[in-house]
Image (cartoon, rainbow, N blue to C red):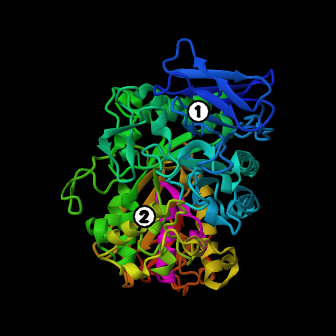
Amino acid sequence: MLPLWSLDAGAQPQPDKSVRFTLWTPYAASPRVRLCSGAAQGDHAMTPVPGERDVYCAIVANAAAGDDYLFVLDDGRELPDPVSRWQPHGVFGASRVVDPAFEWTDNMWRGTPMDEIIAYELHVGTFTPQGTFAAIVPRLPELRALGVNTIELMPVAQFSGDRNWGYDGVGLYAVQDSYGGPLELKKLIDAAHELRIGVILDVVYNHVGSEGNNLAAFGPYFTDRYKTPWGAALNYDGPDSDAVRRFVVDNASYWAAEFHIDGLRLDAAHGIFDLTARHLLEEIAAAVHDRAKEMQKSVVVIAESDLNDPRLVNSVEYNGFGLDAQWSDDFHHAVHSVLTGEINGYYCDFGTVSHIGDALREPFVYDGRYSTYRRRRHGRPSVGLASDRFVVSVQNHDQVGNRAHGDRLAALLTPDKLRLAAALLLLSPYIPMLFMGEEYGETNPFQYFVSHRDAQLAASVRDGRKREYAAFSSGADLPDPQADATFQRSKIDWDKRSQGGHGELLSLYRDLIALRRENWLMRPDRARITVNDGNQGWITILRECVDEWSDTYPTILSVFNCSAAALEVPIPDSTGCAWSMRLGTDAAGYGGNAQLATHVATDEESDGPRRLLASAPRTIYMPPWTAAVYIAQPGASAHVGR
């Protein structure tokens, strides 16, 4: 059964076995639809749609799903449909009529609430050797066993060639043919829902790729009033922008309604320029939430933005855009700079353990303070916003792939630091997101790759990368984005998961996620969270239950030594109970030396081998680059990590 909302642009099969073709184009007076295959081959005139501005329609009898077609403009140009559901012959070929109906089996699926998400970002082409939607399906049980309940797909909109990060997409409605097309994507989503795994889709509304981009031939989709680093800005607030806005807002609804997507991640929302009274982001969020209500499920809208602006997630009633969450890069930058020692580029604004402490208290470290990197004040405070409105990571496609050689943390850090990074992420009060392979310390790089047909464009991309990284690397040793070898190097190696230290790190990730999910630790709205940090390199996070279940749930203390020195970390005496270890990153089962104490006694307990300190304040001995979780609960026995 189709949802209440349905797409009414492009090619729509009708109940009477005809197909309705619809096109918006102010640049043509008599467009035609050309059927390239099937019983209705040939040209068919399109007529204006009453009540619609510059919208044309043709209802073609005997056309059917599976037929290929093109639109023909007044000057004779034959072009694919801007709202094509499928480009089986690539961006330069004909569009294909697709029947949107699908036998879904997820009628009982209601989505994953924002505050429960454990996200896992993956790139379809490099997640498996095959690089297809179908090849992901057999891997879903392993992700579920890890504890992941949401996968986030990097963009799948049709791009030129068969390998690309996805941010050069030109067919916003068409599902990449080399990944398997729209039917295989629906099968993946349905299979994920069967395992109670949600699917978030990365979408790009700030620009459109260059190769195969024909939108400008149909209408004023672009504007020169604004500039983006990636291509021409879309026309969201100029003349004829109503139709451009509808093109994008309907696209967001399309993924939610027709593909049962559980959320959208809006790429670089700071590159969406709109000075109208109702910002496009607000309009997108409202449309997606309407689809969610119709489908009686949760569908979230998450923005990537480097503005540190809480208005994105503030409610419309409080002059916000009403999005469900946004990425917060300050957490990543703070953790990365301390663990790697890198302070170049934007990392110059970070580099101290206090920055990590600040990022754990509030998502925006730069909340109006002066940024050395930007040479101006940056951001505004997010005080009062729930922490589940922010998504954080220690690795993602940008922070790995935009390095000169695409090196991951596992290639930069020692095992103890990798374990500490995992703990900081999964014990933070925010929504955690893993990047594919992170959970077992993947060492294969994730590099930037394309497969442009235009040799001049490929050379331009190659030269641009050399200029961008001239200060960090000689041009000769930079990976060639156009080379297939660059793409092949970027595939993750599933065999590593069971090998030595990789398997030990995987165990830690699995146990950290289980700890996060087993009780209110993942529900910051039900806990009072206190973050303390010392200038010697330690951080503590104390979680105390404050609702009607306070007599049921324990108090939880997370302790982090983010330094190369062993430290005695002072701990709070919040309950008068003994602290027993729940998990320690240096446990032998995780590849550590098992030096962390398993128990911290109260002052009332007698001296003995488990006694750590004879007088207040009590402290915990923390070896370098370690993290531990202690629980205070009357009558609870000590639980020792592996």
Q: Which residues are magenta?
A: 413-440
| Residue 601 visible, this angle | no
**388 part of magenta stretch:** no
Q: Secondary structure at mark 1?
A: strand
Disc 1 or disc 2, which is closer to the eye?
1
Q: Residues within 10 Å of mark 1 (few under 14, many from 20)?
A: many
**427 part of magenta stretch:** yes
590 or 180: nearer the viewer: 180
- Is 385 situated left or right of 218 in this image? left
Q: x, y (%) of residue 302?
A: 49, 45
Give the quadrant of the N terminus.
top right
Residue at the (43%, 46%) spot, across then down: 207
Q: x, y (%) of residue 538?
A: 36, 73
Q: x, y (%) of residue 186?
A: 72, 45
Q: Secondary structure at mark 2?
A: helix
212 or 258: nearer the viewer: 212
Q: 24 above or below 367?
A: above
The residue indicated by pointer 1 is 72
Q: CA distance from mark 1 to mark 2?
A: 31 Å
- Amino acid under disc 1: Val
Query: Residue 463 falls in which quadrant of the image?
Result: bottom left
